[in-house]
Image (spheres, rainbow, N blue to C red):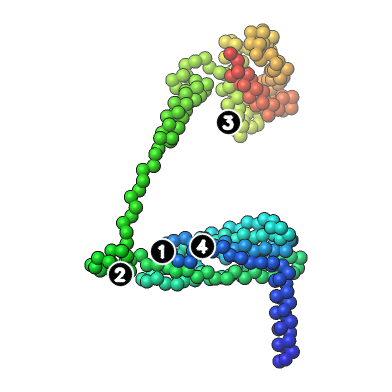
Amino acid sequence: MLLALLLMGFVTAASAADDAALVRSVATVEPRAFGYFLGDVIRREVLIDLKPGAEIERGTLPRPGPINYWLELRSVDVDESSAGDSTRVRISLSYQAFYSALDPRRLEIPGFVVSIADEGVSGQARVPPFGFMMSPLREIFPGKEADAKAVSLRPDVRPQRISTADARTAIAIAAPSGLVALLLLAIHYAWWPFHRRAGRPFTEAARFLRSNATNLIGDGGYRAALLKLHRAFDRAAGHRVLPDDLEDFLARHSEFAGEAGDIGRLFAASRVAFYGNDVSAARAYMPMAELTELGARLGTIERSAP
């Protein structure tokens, strides 16, 4: 029995030594201890100074949720910073009290223990409970006496008018600006009622290739992509464009001259695919990804042209 007591004392002393080595101080920043009513939120802060390198085990922190029938922990936030030669851990806790007091009543938020660890050494930081006074919502001395009015519930404060001049000014400026931007966007994309302007065949072809990327597969999909680009050249020129017509087309539409090399590859791949009936060779010469990229570049050039 004596040996067991000696061992227990040794373990307790060692645990206290570990706590002192890891935890240098524990302090709490408490709110007022009185004047709380049903539904009020109470915020506490716990400041724990640790030995550098030591860390709290976050799994030992209180978890948000009901604590008992009248108290709920709403949030737990942890922040770490340097404080001299220590690591300061700030634990911010928000509690909400739902105790419906019939008279002033002293209540207590329970304390908790946080575990600390550092290179195999463990310790604990003990946060003390916090006591406060909960007040009733009803009148303390109801009655008809004149002095009873001094302790009766007072009427709600009349709400003040908040000026909305700044918000109205911002809306007045933003609304016309937004309408102008929407109008310019409608003109740019030829939305109704601006859809009667000259079409943009390369832009339409680029959108088709981009939006149908998952459908344009196999030999049929590759041929469809080639045809879409060919029809864009035909619409831009106003007639069918054959390989022998490319030089004349680029002379009339000089904005596309920078893409002459890839345009020539497009027509060469088309010749192999349609006239040579060898889609695999055409795809190897100009893959689908390059067709899509060429269509996107031609559409960008088309939109940038005056």
Crowd class of label 1 (few under 14; some 14 to 19; many from 20; radius 10 Å) = some
- Disc nearer the start of the sequence (2/3): 2
What count of labels does the image hold? 4
The quadrant of the picture occupied by the C terminus is top right
Whether the residues at callouts 2 and 3 have beta carbons within 8 Å, the answer is no
Residue with the mark numbered 4: 31
Q: Nearer the viewer, residue 279 or 155?
A: 155
Dot 4: element: loop
Residue with the mark numbered 2: 141
User: What is the distance, in whole Å, between disc 4 and disc 1 at their CAs?
Assistant: 14 Å
| Residue 292 location (% of width, % of height) | 65, 26
- Disc nearer the start of the sequence (1/3): 1
Indicate which label's residue lies in the foreground, 4 or 1. Answer: 4
| Residue 17 location (% of width, % of height) | 73, 74
Q: In this view, does 209 lie above or below 12?
A: above
User: What is the distance, in whole Å, between disc 3 and disc 4 at their CAs?
Assistant: 60 Å
* Amino acid identity at mark 2: Phe
Q: Which residue lies furthest to the bottom in this view?
A: 1
Dot 1: element: loop
Q: Which mark is residue 233?
A: none
Residue with the mark numbered 1: 37
